[in-house]
């Protein structure tokens, strides 16, 4: 528990919850800027945080849910209660963000908790209620119908009727509950091509224990390169201080990982920045936020799918492009200097741009759609302006290099096996 020190001499300790790629990206952001090792706590060990020298990871079985979470956090808090320096608590998953918010009053006695209150979190974390908030504040989203368990169990199946042309998109409204639902064919989100397929999937979802609503949506046409991802930081006075827009070119086609970006180029779009800034400040948000959206060529607007109340899984693309994510929370809560800084609208300077990759270059070249964005990515590859989250020169060891190389190489097989079934057929011209 050796504190990290800023250039001005102020000391602090970051504590990160989770063990995935997002955790490694945040730990790397702290390490690049300040040096030092971060403490992390998780329920299970995942590959991105194995054999690392920049994270001190402690595992606790069942940590991702109450009552284990709050019981363990009380034990962890005792380790820091006599700590002179501030301890920043950061979640790198939806479940941990919700748990911090739920117990924010108690945890804030020991930790700096840059998260919204629980009532606001619940209205944003659930996709169904998020769309109501979005409507109220003028944030566009896809045409949506809510499917309920009651409608599924009713003899009258009119509540299950699909009002949109196929293909349609189907996903759980409650992403945290969805983590505990398992069946053959389960995905993070479904693209459905017929009514028979739709009824079969809805049946499997509810028959396997899911209780919350489902989001049925008009499928916005176009390949992965029509997606955009935006990471933002909002200070404790509810002012947006940084927004960084990314242009994903390719997503993971593996069923359990659909929607995870694997190639992102930075992009500047002041209209999107203005829209998101107004939304976040209107709802009095605080902390990290991550938005997924897709460009709809039919009406030339970006449609927002969701907000995550944390930095995104692929958010290291922000740090890679010169906007270190750790910097903002430290300047906000430790230095006290962020309040007087102007809002950063990232990626205006193309000379600074770098391509973020979560897959080998050869997989990107084989599966990315041929368009302006992929051509720009190819330019960046040729200029050696690329980076990853997990391959870090200051955290090298043979074991880590071997595991990360194996993890990346696995994408060759995953794309060969799943891309056509789960992605390719949806993007035919």
Image (spheres, rainbow, N blue to C red):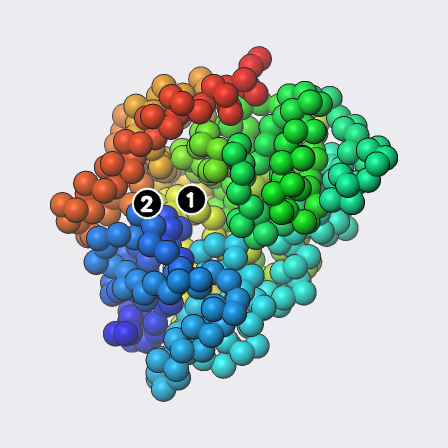
Number of marks in picture: 2
Q: Residue 66's spot in the image, x, y percent?
A: 53, 66
Q: Is residue 327 visible?
A: no
Q: Is 361 positioned to the left or the right of 327 in the image? A: left
**Lateral position of residue 127 relative to residue 265, left or right:** right
For the residues bearing labels 2 and 1, Cβ distance under 8 angstroms: yes
Rendered position, 122 above or below 347: below
The residue most toward the top is 429
The residue that appears at 30% across and 53% down in the rendered structure is: 49
Looking at the picture, how far across and down is residue 326, in whole percent? Answer: 39, 60
Residue annotated with mark 1: 314
200 vs 109, left or right, is right
Give the spatial CA distance, label 2 vs label 1.
Answer: 8 Å
Question: Looking at the picture, does residue 362 appear above or below residue 94?
Answer: above
Which residue matches tag 2? Answer: 389
Q: Residues within 10 Å of mark 1 (few under 14, many from 20)?
A: many
Q: Position of residue 203 (x, y in %)?
A: 67, 35
Badge 2 marks a residue whose secondary structure is loop
Q: Nearer the viewer, residue 245 or 93?
A: 93
Instruction: In this rendered view, identify the residue nearer to me: 306 or 140.
Output: 306
Picture coordinates of residue 294 (x, y %)? Answer: 59, 33
Q: Residue at x 59, y 52 (%)?
A: 177
In which quadrant of the rendered view does residue 4 lie?
A: bottom left
Q: How many neighbours does mark 2 have within 10 angstroms: few (below 14), some (14-19), or many (20 or more)?
A: many
Question: Which of disc 1 and disc 2 is earlier in sequence?
Answer: 1
The part of the image, by quadrant, that contains residue 111 is: bottom left
Residue at (31% x, 32% y) in the render: 410
269 or 134: nearer the viewer = 134
Which residue is drawn at the image coordinates 67% and 49% (left, top)?
211
């Amino acid at each position: 528990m050796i504190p990290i020190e800023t250039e001005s001499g102020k000391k602090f300790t970051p504590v990160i919850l989770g063990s995935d790629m997002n955790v490694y990206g945040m730990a790397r952001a702290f390490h690049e800027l300040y040096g030092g090792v971060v403490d992390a706590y998780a329920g299970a060990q995942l590959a991105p945080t194995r054999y690392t020298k920049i994270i001190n990871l402690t595992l606790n079985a069942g940590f991702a849910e109450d009552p284990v979470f709050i019981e363990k956090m009380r034990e962890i808090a005792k380790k820091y209660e006599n700590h002179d320096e501030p301890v920043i608590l950061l979640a790198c998953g939806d479940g941990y963000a919700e748990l911090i918010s739920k117990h924010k009053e108690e945890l804030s006695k020991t930790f700096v908790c840059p998260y919204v209150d629980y009532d606001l979190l619940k209205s944003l974390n659930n996709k169904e209620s998020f769309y109501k908030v979005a409507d109220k504040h003028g944030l566009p989203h896809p045409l949506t119908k809510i499917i309920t368990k009651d409608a599924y169990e009713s003899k009258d199946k009119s509540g299950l009727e699909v009002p949109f042309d196929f293909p349609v998109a189907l996903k759980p409204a409650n992403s945290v509950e969805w983590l505990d639902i398992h069946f053959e064919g389960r995905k993070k989100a479904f693209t459905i091509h017929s009514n028979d397929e739709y009824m079969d999937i809805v049946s499997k979802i509810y028959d396997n224990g899911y209780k919350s609503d489902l989001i049925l949506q008009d499928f916005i046409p176009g390949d992965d390169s029509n997606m955009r991802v935006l990471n933002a930081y909002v200070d404790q006075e509810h002012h947006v201080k940084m927004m960084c827009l990314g242009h994903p070119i390719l997503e993971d086609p593996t069923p359990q990982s659909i929607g995870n970006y694997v190639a992102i180029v930075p992009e500047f779009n002041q209209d999107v920045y203005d829209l998101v800034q107004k939304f976040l400040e209107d709802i009095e948000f605080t902390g990290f936020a991550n938005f997924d959206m897709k460009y709809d060529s039919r009406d030339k607007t970006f449609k927002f799918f969701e907000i995550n109340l944390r930095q995104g899984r692929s958010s290291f693309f922000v740090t890679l492009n010169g906007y270190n994510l750790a910097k903002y929370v430290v300047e906000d809560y430790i230095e006290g200097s962020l309040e007087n800084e102007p809002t950063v609208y990232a990626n205006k300077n193309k000379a600074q741009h770098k391509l973020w990759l979560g897959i080998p270059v050869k997989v990107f070249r084989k599966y990315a759609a041929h368009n302006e964005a992929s051509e720009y990515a190819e330019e960046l590859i040729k200029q050696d302006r690329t980076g990853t989250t997990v391959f870090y020169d200051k955290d090298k060891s043979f074991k880590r290099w071997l595991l990360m190389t194996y993890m990346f190489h696995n994408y060759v097989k995953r794309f060969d096996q799943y891309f056509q079934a789960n992605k390719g057929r949806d993007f035919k011209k």
